[in-house]
Image (cartoon, rainbow, N blue to C red):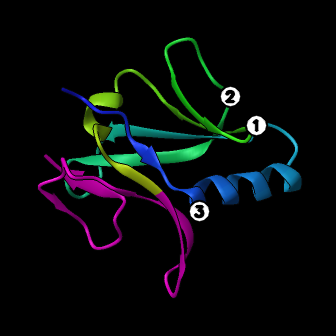
Amino acid sequence: MNLPPHVTDRAFARLAEIATEVDGPTALRVAVEGGGCSGFQYDIRLDEPTEDDLVLEKDGSKVLVDSVSLPFLSNAVIDFSDDLIGARFVVENPNATSSCGCGTSFSM
């Protein structure tokens, strides 16, 4: 059974902050594409919802996952991290068998 990804309160809070700072799309798209040093890579960007998206929403903030990426992100956690590497959205993916050091690519 594929469980949808979970979005942390910290990620939703950062999206709410972004919505007050930018003109244009404020929904966070988390997608999986082929490529990267480990075989797959995350594409994380602001975007508008499309017809085939799973929309995860809290207090008006939205995270979008397209139907092709959804199986790769089953039961993953989408979070926001602000540490020495920098401030960024991160994916903790239990389906990944390995990942690169920067955390943007993974293999299954």
Q: Which residues are magenta?
A: 79-108
Residue at 30 percent across and 56 percent down: it is 105
Q: Amino acid at mark 1?
A: Pro
**The disc label shown at residue 25, or none:** 1
Check the image and report above or below for 85 versus 41: below
- Nearer to the camera, 55 or 105: 55
Q: Amino acid at mark 2?
A: Glu
Q: Is residue 100 left or right of residue 67?
A: left
What's the distance in space between the residues labelled 2 and 3, CA to CA?
21 Å
Which of disc 1 and disc 3 is earlier in sequence?
Answer: 3
Q: x%, y% of residue 49?
A: 63, 24
Q: Looking at the image, do the residues carrying marks 2 and 1 touch, with CB atoms under 8 Å apart?
A: yes
Find numbered disc 1 in the image and state the secondary structure of the residue it sits on.
Answer: loop
Q: Find disc 2 in the rendering and name its residue.
A: 48
Q: Nearer the viewer, mark 2 or mark 3?
A: 3
What's the distance in space between the residues labelled 3 and 1, CA to CA?
19 Å
**The disc label shown at residue 10, or none:** 3
Check the image and report above or below for 84 versus 68: below
Find numbered disc 2 in the image and state the secondary structure of the residue it sits on.
Answer: loop
Find numbered disc 3 in the image and state the secondary structure of the residue it sits on.
Answer: helix
Q: x%, y% of residue 103?
A: 34, 65
Q: Amino acid at mark 3?
A: Arg
Residue at 43 percent across and 38 percent down: it is 31
Q: Give the residue furthest to the bottom.
A: 84
What's the distance in space between the residues labelled 2 and 1, CA to CA?
6 Å
Q: Nearer the viewer, mark 3 or mark 1?
A: 3
Residue at 34 percent across and 29 percent down: it is 70
Q: x%, y% of residue 3?
A: 29, 33
